[in-house]
Image: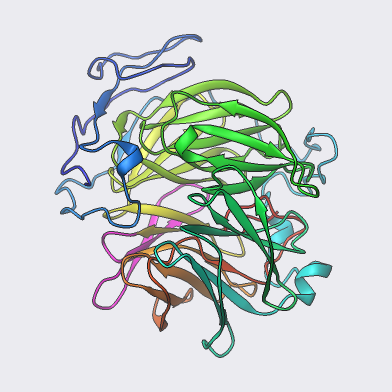
């Protein structure tokens, strides 16, 4: 069950550089600095073991009365922005605009495969074990097919020539052809709760949540290549990559922290504890800011978003959004960040550069906006309604609800095609 309330809401300073294996003492009000020093934190323990938790059936509790922003330690001032080329992971496409790593995924910037894709939304239903396909033009369900036991996400491949529906309970993924909307073969993969592709396109990474492990695969043969065990990262589920593609950050939902991983050596760099370690429904989706200066980390139990500096050591502040902050999506021009507040039935709109609140869109009558994506032209935000067995289509101009579409039982990681961009790094369609 979802823990009620927060412990130790006010935290004054946070700077983390070392791995920490478990909860420590309550937060100190003094500055913490220096490499190799672990931050103190308050641990909020789950009332049930992570193995028995059902992500789609957590109970909801009231939003804390105090929703004012909290600021933490400020990292050293970065150098002035430079237009110099980014030294990327070998084999990765160049970063064309260091000030906006999503500059090649703007309005209708469709690659060859995206141009051939059907304008469809793919909805994985966790409880009914199937995927429903919706025509994004008519809002009509045009196909349904079985995948397995519990389908979590539909993930666009690196070159967007395929989609993969991930069934973590059945240890399989099922290929989907985006050009036809039809299902293909089923492929054995260990516990694919979520899936990402390295920015060089060489590897697929299965996020094996229940094993606290990242598993590297050859994305052509689907042969397993290696594993990285993350014993202090219970509930590993969402991730994103630095602009150079050399480092990734993964959230640890049941440990109140994130893991920083070196992509070249496939090794753990460090664990970073959040200033308040929520361990029932803690860190969820995370995304790097367009200019690469920070990572935004949604935390359902904190009802907001933590901000991790690009030094990958310092949590600088917390941004209150709404009850059950969960999914993060950027507008097509990369100026706004949409935060889905799953327990409140709202979407917070933040300034993508600063994190400052712009507005909040409330779904009529409430709802449970979860995961999805922005349309290729940027005009619509498609989201699964996790607890309501529907899909929401939202107008990104004014936040009005365009339509609600009934789907299967427990819709989760919705993928919307086609997507702009040169390549996909996975999840429900993170493209650059």
Please tell me which residue is depicted at 17% across the width and 48% down the height of the picture. Answer: 64
On the question of residue 337 being in view, the answer is no
On the question of residue 373 being in view, the answer is yes
* Magenta span contains residue 326: no
Please tell me which residue is depicted at 78% across the width and 58% down the height of the picture. Answer: 159
Please tell me which residue is depicted at 49% across the width and 17% down the height of the picture. Answer: 17
- Expressed as whole percent of the image width and height from the top left, the position of residue 11 reads 26, 27
- Expressed as whole percent of the image width and height from the top left, the position of residue 162 reads 73, 63
Front position in the image: 28 or 144: 144
Does 424 sit left or right of 10 as displayed?
A: right
Q: Within the image, what quadrant is residue 389 found in? A: bottom left
- Expressed as whole percent of the image width and height from the top left, the position of residue 161 reads 77, 64
Q: Within the image, what quadrant is residue 121 found in? A: bottom right
Front position in the image: 358 or 348: 348
* Colour scheme shown: rainbow
- Expressed as whole percent of the image width and height from the top left, the position of residue 126 reads 43, 61
The C terminus - image quarter? bottom right
* Magenta span contains residue 347: yes
Query: Magenta residues, as a range?
Result: 342-367
Does 216 sit left or right of 44 as displayed?
A: right
Q: Within the image, what quadrant is residue 181 found in? A: bottom right
Front position in the image: 205 or 173: 173
Q: Is residue 65 above or below residue 9?
A: below
């Amino acid at each position: 069950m979802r823990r009620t309330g927060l412990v130790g809401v006010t935290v004054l300073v946070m700077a983390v550089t070392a791995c920490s294996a478990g909860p420590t003492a309550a937060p100190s009000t003094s500055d913490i600095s220096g490499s190799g020093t672990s931050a103190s934190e308050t641990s909020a323990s789950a009332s049930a073991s992570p193995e028995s938790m059902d992500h789609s059936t957590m109970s909801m509790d009231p939003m804390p009365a105090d929703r004012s922003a909290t600021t933490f330690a400020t990292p050293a001032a970065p150098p002035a922005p430079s237009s110099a080329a980014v030294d990327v992971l070998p084999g990765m496409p160049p970063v064309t605009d260091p000030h906006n790593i999503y500059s090649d995924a703007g309005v209708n910037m469709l690659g060859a495969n995206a141009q051939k894709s059907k304008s469809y939304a793919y909805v994985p239903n966790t409880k009914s074990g199937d995927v429903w396909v919706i025509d994004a033009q008519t809002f009509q369900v045009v196909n349904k097919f079985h995948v397995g036991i519990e389908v979590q996400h539909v993930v666009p491949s690196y070159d967007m020539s395929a989609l993969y529906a991930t069934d973590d309970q059945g240890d399989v993924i099922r290929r989907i052809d985006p050009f036809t909307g039809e299902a293909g073969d089923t492929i054995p993969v260990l516990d694919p709760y979520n899936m990402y592709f390295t920015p060089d396109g060489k590897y697929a990474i299965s996020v094996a949540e229940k094993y606290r492990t990242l598993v590297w695969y050859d994305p052509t043969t689907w042969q397993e290549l290696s594993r990285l065990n993350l014993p202090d990262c219970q509930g590993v589920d969402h991730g994103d990559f630095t602009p150079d593609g050399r480092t990734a950050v993964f959230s640890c939902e049941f440990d109140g922290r994130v893991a920083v991983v070196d992509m070249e050596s496939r090794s753990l760099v460090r664990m970073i504890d959040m200033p308040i370690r929520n361990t029932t429904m803690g860190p969820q989706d995370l995304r790097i800011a367009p200019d690469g200066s920070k990572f935004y980390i949604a935390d359902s139990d904190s009802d907001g978003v933590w901000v991790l500096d690009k030094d990958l050591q310092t949590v600088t502040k917390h941004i209150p959004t709404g009850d059950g902050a969960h999914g993060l999506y950027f507008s097509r021009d990369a100026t706004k960040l949409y935060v889905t507040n799953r327990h409140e039935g709202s979407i917070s709109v933040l300034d993508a550069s600063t994190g400052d609140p712009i507005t909040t869109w409330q779904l009529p009558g409430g709802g449970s906006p979860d995961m999805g994506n922005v349309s290729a032209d940027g005009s619509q935000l498609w989201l699964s309604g996790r607890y309501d067995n529907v899909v929401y289509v939202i107008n990104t101009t004014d936040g009005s609800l365009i339509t609600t579409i009934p789907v299967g039982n427990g819709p989760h990681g919705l993928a919307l095609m086609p997507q702009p961009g040169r390549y996909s790094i996975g999840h429900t369609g993170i493209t650059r």
